[in-house]
Structure formats: C-alpha cells, structure tokens
Amino acid sequence: MFIILKERDVDRDGLYEWGPYGIIENVRDGWNAVFQLFSEGEDEGRDISDELDALDLSCQVANEMYYLKLMAKELGDKKGMKEWTKKFDKLAKLINKYMWDEQDKFYYHVAMSDNSFEFEGESLKRKEIIGFLPMWARVATKEQAKELVKHLKNPDSFWRKYGVPTLAADDPNYTAFVDGCCRWNGPIWLLWDYMVFDGLKNYGYNKLAKQLADKMMLAVTTQLEKNHHFWESYSPDYPMQECPSNYIWDSIMAKLLIEVYQR
C-alpha cells in the first residue's frame, strides 16, 4: 500500500495513476476503449493509462484504506483508525470532486494534466464497468449510487442477459462477441461483476444484487452445460465463447454460491 501511495501519484494530487504500460499492470491487458484511445482498435499501440488519474486504481486504493481503517478499529488502534479514516475521506472527496460527471451522472478517468474529462482533444467519458467501483469502495454518496443504479438497470447499456459488460453496449466500441483473450470492450469478467454485486449490497440494493448474481450464474451454467468449461470472460449477450478456458478467477462463483444461494 505504501509503495502505491508513494509511486502511483506522480503529480501528488491525491489521485492515482497506473505505471508504465498500465494495461498490463492493472490486468486489463487487451483492447481497452480508454487506455488505448489512440490505437484504432489494435491490441498493441499507445497506452495512455500512466497519463491519466485512473478511476479504477483510485477506487482500489480507497477500498484498501477503508479496510485498513476497519482493521485498526478491530485491533483497538485508535491512532491507526484516525489516520486511515482521514486518508479514506480525503481520497473519496477527490474522486467525487474530479471523477464524477454531474452531467452524465457517472464516474470516469480524468487527464492527469488538468483533471478534466478530455485528453489531447478526445473525450475520456466512456462508460466502463469501473464506473460502478465507487459503490464497491464506498466512495459514492447515496445520491450518486442512486444515479449509478439507473445506468446499471438500463438494458441498452449495462443490464445485459449474462451480466454487466466491461463497456456499455451503447458505446461505439462495444462488442458482444468474445473473439480472443483479454477483451475489455464488452465481454464479462466475473470478478468485476462480483465487485458491482458487492457495491450494490453496500448501498442496500439487495434485490438488484440478487438479480445480477442470477445473470452471472446463468453465464456460468450455460457454458458448463454446453462445453464443461469455465472461461476467462463471457459474452454479455450470446452463448458463444472464443477465449482461454478454465481460469482460476471464476472461483469467485463459489463465494457467490455461499453468499446468495447458501450452497
């Protein structure tokens, strides 16, 4: 944590950016509509992730701070609890100040140079699944969470048959087809859908969280019945898969079985 705080905030504005070639560092290591904004759809090309204050990393850091605060409380460490509460509150305030777009009612990355939603004349306002991470990290206000849920429930963007896609379905770069490894322009990654599920529970949207769990379960059972494989990622709309099979992170479904289905 301390290394991240020291080395992933180059401009010292309190928000965090990925390191060089960040699409590998953050494990979103394939076509990404924002990080490869100037790559014309190619997997390899210019990666601007280290030139942005990254919403995903900033939320991940905030989440760690939140749990360090809880750990300090459990240990009776009043000084530690005060320290991590202050750090969490400060970061949450910055995320909401700069990364929440009041017009769209959604969260985005911002340019590191000026904290705007524009980078070299191109808009960074692309609705990705990471826009829901402020609910997972408990950063969003109740009012912001309410607006995010409206986006989530929209079948034309995020509320698809098999779960929440990595990129909104009404984005021009969206694809429902999983045509290879490491796609972040539509395919569903169960771990990230679980983070959306967890965020919904944080704000009391338990019924909607159960509905999302059902979608995730449908994605998995459809494939297990069809070909007996867990997959790296899943199509949000179709039962066809063309990506690496049998990935360990699909074990998140075991946690979902326990939490939702009590199995």
Image: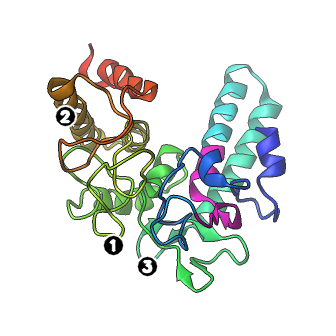
N-terminal-most mark, 3 or 2: 3
The residue labelled by disc 2 is: 218
Mark closer to the chain start, 2 or 1:
1
Q: Is residue 202 magenta?
A: no
Q: Is residue 74 above or below residue 211?
A: above
Question: Left or right: 32 with respect to 240?
Answer: right
Q: Which residue is mark 1?
A: 172
- The residue located at (54%, 45%) in the rendering is 137
Q: Check whether the beta carbons of the residues at disc 3 and disc 2 lie within 8 A of each other.
A: no
Residue 10, quarter of picture: bottom right
Q: Nearer the viewer, mark 3 or mark 1?
A: 1
The residue depicted at 70 percent of the width and 61 percent of the height is 50
Spatial CA span between label 3 and label 1: 20 Å
Q: CA distance from mark 3 to mark 2?
A: 34 Å
The alpha-carbon separation of the residues under discs 2 and 1 comes to 26 Å
Magenta segment, which residues?
Answer: 45-62
The residue located at (84%, 48%) in the rendering is: 6
Residue 213 picture location, percent across and down: 27, 35
What secondary structure is the stretch in magenta mostly built from?
Answer: helix
Going by the numbered disc 1, the residue's amino acid type is: Pro
Q: Quadrant of the C terminus?
A: top left
**Residue behind mark 3:** 103
The amino acid beneath tag 2 is: Leu
Q: Residue 224's quadrant in the figure?
A: top left
Q: For residue 11, what is the image quadrant?
A: bottom right
Residue 15: x and y in percent read 70, 59
Question: In the picture, which quadrant includes the N terminus?
Answer: top right
Percent position (x, y) of residue 198? 41, 38
